[in-house]
Amino acid sequence: MLARQAPGGPAVSAAWRALVIAAVYFVADTLLNKFALGDGWAIFWPLNGITIALLIRKPRREWPLLLAAVALGTGGGEYLDDNTLVSTLVQRLFSVFEVSISAALLPPFENPDSWLRKPRLYPRFAAAVLVGPAVSGLLAAAYFNAFEATPFWSAFNAWALADAMGIAAVLPLALSLSSADLHALRDLRRVAAGVGTIASAFAVMVLIFMTSRYPLIFVLYPLLMLVDWMLGLLGSSIALCAACVMAVFLTEHGYGPFANPVGLGVTRNLAVQVYLGFHLIGFLPISILFLQQRRMDQELRDSLARADKLASLDSLTGVANRRTLDARLEEQWDLAARNQAPLALLMIDADHFKEFNDRLGHQAGDACLRAMAGAMSRRVSRPADVVARFGGEEFAVLLPDTPLEGAGRVAEIIRAAVQQLAIVHPGKPNPAAVDAPAAPRHVTVSIGCAALVPPPGAKSHVLVELADRALYEAKRSGRDRVCVVDPGADLYAWQPGTAMQKLHARIEAHRQQVPPR
């Protein structure tokens, strides 16, 4: 019996999730105000970017509860940071309005790759960065100007520009945390390379912002491009957010080229925002270009792999073609010669197939060949084994590291599997018992089987000739059967050609050189 769900279960679960989100935002808001940024919140504020990333992952019907949770958490942090209750409530209202506008301007998010390929993404991203903070900034500036006597444009800059900077920097990072780049963390080598790259970039950024001279500030943009090229969106987003937090922190503590922007004609905060804003504006287009380049490279590799696979398969039956069989036969022959291991080959031919084609047509014949190939493939499952179409209605099965006895068993399994397909042959019915109706004849196969350990100097075609002669004997002796050939014992029984005579001579010479045990 299914357990009965408690009343209000989903509602209670949603409420708990909202409380957890509120607690996380409360802790984050407090840490940012008290330790990480201090008064630097007027330069760069990251939490709204995280909120927008959460919103565009969710259906809009879930937005009100999520926004209420975020407002509760950040409101608690702001209230403890010496804000009045009324000011806190008004600011949270403006902030909720801002992230709702910005999230509504962006397309829904499923994964970074598909999201970055959305049409007109960059204009929509730019609008989300600018419109939401601008609208809420105007409202906040009007409120602070009217009730706290703060200059209008000073309040607007402190609110709108800081939020826009935070959205532009943190939103890509929050979204990229679910990208395929994150799965690369399972590879220790890639993790080590990523950590080393980020650490090197971090050291360079410290050098940039610790110096009081301006020329080094231009190093940041090519550094971010390098990180994006090496690590993708996730790595460059981490580097960019680290640059923003570091620039704000060091500038607030009197370090770096923007701590005392003499001769620039702008305030310290605006100088940092202009500098970081340039990188934030140019960051996403570069990431999109690199993503497209990586995707095109991957699609090209996939296309080449598919083309190579198609070139190795028989178009009708889907098994390996003759070219692939020849290549694998040479490889396995050389490997068997080195390891002195047996190599087996089955030659398989459909019985009376010309009559089948003549009576039923080539489409029926093609369907029959496909069914036969499928039956063989299902019975030959080792990774190194090869089922191939040799030509016409003839197939071959290559069995590495298989002695003659094992190859004979596989051949009998394949013969029985084709018979079990019960494909009716249009020829004469099989003879039945006396006074019994004739049973229909089904498609069958004859199989020649050969296996040997490659002797010194021998070529792979001798194995093909042995298996082909065994197939001839299976056809001659009645069809629908397996015939095997032992090149050591029955070599002359098959009336070999010149190649087989040479093989036998080499075997005899080899036996004379090796002392008996």
Image (cartoon, rainbow, N blue to C red):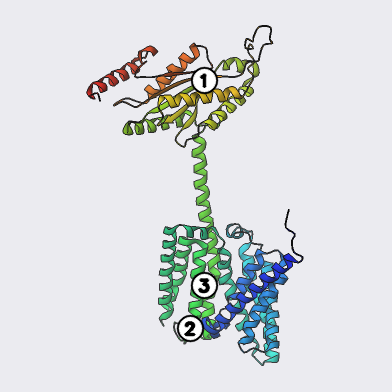
Helix, strand or loop at label 2? It is helix
Judging by the rendered image, the residue that carries numbered circle 3 is: 241
Q: Residues within 10 Å of mark 3 (few under 14, many from 20)?
A: many
Helix, strand or loop at label 1? It is strand
Tell me the kind of residue under disc 1. Answer: Asp
**Where's residue 313, x and y in %?**
51, 33
Q: From mark 2 to mark 3, how far is it between C-alphas?
A: 15 Å
Tell me the kind of residue under disc 2. Answer: Thr
Q: Residue at x 32, y 31 (%)?
A: 340
Report the residue that reaches farthest toward the right: 7
Of 327 and 481, which appears nearest the observer? 481
Q: From mark 2 to mark 1, how far is it between C-alphas?
A: 82 Å
Q: Residue 341's quadrant in the figure?
A: top left
Residue 24, label in figure = none
Residue 13 to residue 324: above or below:
below
- Whether pointer 2 and pointer 3 mark residues with C-beta atoms closer than 8 Å, the reply is no
Q: Is residue 71 visible?
A: yes
Report the residue that reaches farthest toward the top: 434
Of 492 and 392, which appears nearest the observer? 492
Judging by the rendered image, the residue that carries numbered circle 2 is: 251
Report the residue that reaches farthest toward the bottom: 149
Tell me the kind of residue under disc 3. Answer: Cys
Q: Quadrant of the C terminus?
A: top left
Residue 349, label in figure = 1
Nearer to us of marks 3 and 1 is: 1
**Where's residue 182, x and y in %?**
52, 60
Q: Residues within 10 Å of mark 2 (few under 14, many from 20)?
A: many
Q: Residue 336's quadrant in the figure?
A: top left
Nearer to us of marks 2 and 1 is: 1
